[in-house]
Amino acid sequence: MKSPNYSVHLSLIGMAALWGASWPWGRVVAQAMPPLAAASLRFLIASVALLLWMSWSGRLKALCTLDSREWLGLLNASAFGVFGYSIFFLLALKLVPAGKASMVVALNPVLILILASLLFREPVNRKMSLGVILAVSGALYALSAGSISSLMPGQSGIGEWLLLGCALCWVSYTLIGRTVLTTVDSLTATSMTTLIGAVLLSISSLGVEGLSAWGSLIHAPSQAWYSVLALGLGSTALAFAWYMHGVKSLGATSAGAYLALVPLFGVLLSNLWLKETLNPSLIGGGLLAISGMALMSWGRQTLNTKDNTPAENSQLQLGQYDQQSHPDTKRPA
C-alpha cells in the first residue's frame, strides 16, 4: 500500500470545484455576451493553453502521425462535445439558474453507463443500478423544482430541455471518444477536439451573429471577461491537467469518484457568487444525485475488484469528461 498522496486528492477536489464553478461563470457570460462568440473565445483560450502544454510535453510531433480515420473521429467528437455542448450550455444558462443547471452533470455518467451497457455489453451490478436510479431521480427533482411532472413536453421550459441537450451531446462525445482514444493519447485528443471546436464555433458565430458580435465583446463587463478567462484556463486546461494527474496517480475509477462533487460545488458557488436561492428541491435533489453518482462509482470499484480489472481500463465506463470542461474521455461541464 502506498502512502496517501494528499496533493493528488486536493487537486481532484480543485478539479471538481473548477467544473462546478463553470456553471456560475457560464451564467455570467451567457447574460453579457453573444453565446457563439463567447463560446469561441473560451475554447480559443483553452486551445492556446493546451497546445502550449502539448509543445512542452513534446507531443506536437504526434499530430503528423494521425491518419484520416483518427482525424474524422476527432472531428465527430468535437462536433458533439465542444460545438454542440457549448451551444446548449450557454443558451440554457440564459434561462436557467446556474446552480439548478449544474444538476444535469449527474445525468452524464448515468446515460453513458446505460448506453455503454447496451452498446458495448459492459457489466452493471446492483450498486450501479441503484446509483442510476438515485442520480436520475435527484437530478430530475432538482431540475423540475420538486415537480418531475413539470418536465413533461408542453409543461417544462425550454431551458430544461436545452440542459438535456447538454447531457446528450456529452454522452455522444464520450462514446465517440471511446473509439478515438484507442489510438490517440488523451492530451492530443482533448487538445485537438478543443481546437476543432473553437474553429467550428468561430465559423458559426461569424455566420450567425456576424462581426458585430465580436465587436460587442469589447463592451462586455469585466466580470464577463474574467469568467471567460476562468472557463478557458481554469475549467478547461487546468482542471484537465489535475484530472489527468489524478487518473495517473489513483486510477480512473478513484479519480472519477470526485465527479460527484461537481453539482455540489455548482450549487454552492452559484449561491455564493450569484446569490441564487438554495431551495429545498435543489438541496434534496442535489444530495440524492450526488449519492447516486457516488454509489455508481462504488459499484464500478467493486466490479473492478471482483473481476480483477485495472481501474485505468474503466475510465470510459464512468463517463468522466465534465461538464464544460475536458477530461480525458471526454468533456465538460
Image (cartoon, grey):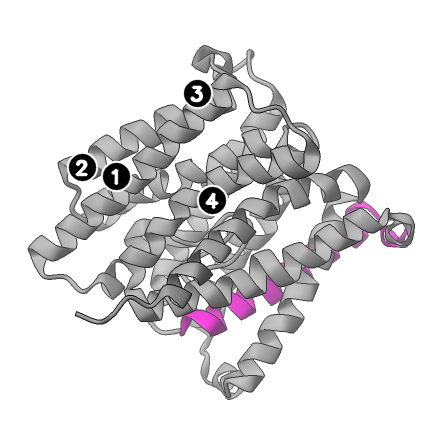
Of labels 4 and 3, the one closer to you: 4
Can residue 8 be spotted in the picture? yes
Q: Which residue position holds label 2?
A: 127
Can residue 204 be spotted in the picture? no
Q: Which residue position holds label 1?
A: 295
Q: Is residue 296 toward the left or the right of residue 58 in the image?
A: left
Q: Which residue position holds label 4?
A: 262
**Which amino acid type is shown beneath numbered disc 4?**
Val
In the image, the segment drawn in magenta is 185-214
Q: Is residue 193 magenta?
A: yes
Residue at image coords 38%, 60%: 9
Q: Earlier in the sequence, mark 1 or mark 4?
A: 4
Say what secondary structure mark 4 lies in. Answer: helix
Q: Earlier in the sequence, mark 3 or mark 1?
A: 3
x, y percent for residue 232: 65, 59
Residue at image coords 55%, 29%: 100
Proximity of marks 1 and 4: CB atoms separated by less than 8 Å = no
Q: Which residue position holds label 3?
A: 141
**Which amino acid type is shown beneath numbered disc 3?**
Tyr
Say what secondary structure mark 3 lies in. Answer: helix
Q: Tell me the chief SS of the magenta region.
A: helix
Q: Earlier in the sequence, mark 2 or mark 4?
A: 2
Frontmost residue, 81 versus 324:
324
**Which amino acid type is shown beneath numbered disc 1?**
Leu
Say what secondary structure mark 1 lies in. Answer: helix
Q: Earlier in the sequence, mark 3 or mark 2?
A: 2
x, y percent for residue 208: 78, 46
Q: Is residue 207 toward the left or the right of residue 238 in the image?
A: right
CA–CA distance in space, label 4 to label 3: 17 Å
Q: Residues within 10 Å of mark 2 (few under 14, many from 20)?
A: some
x, y percent for residue 253: 28, 56
Residue at image coords 77%, 37%: 31
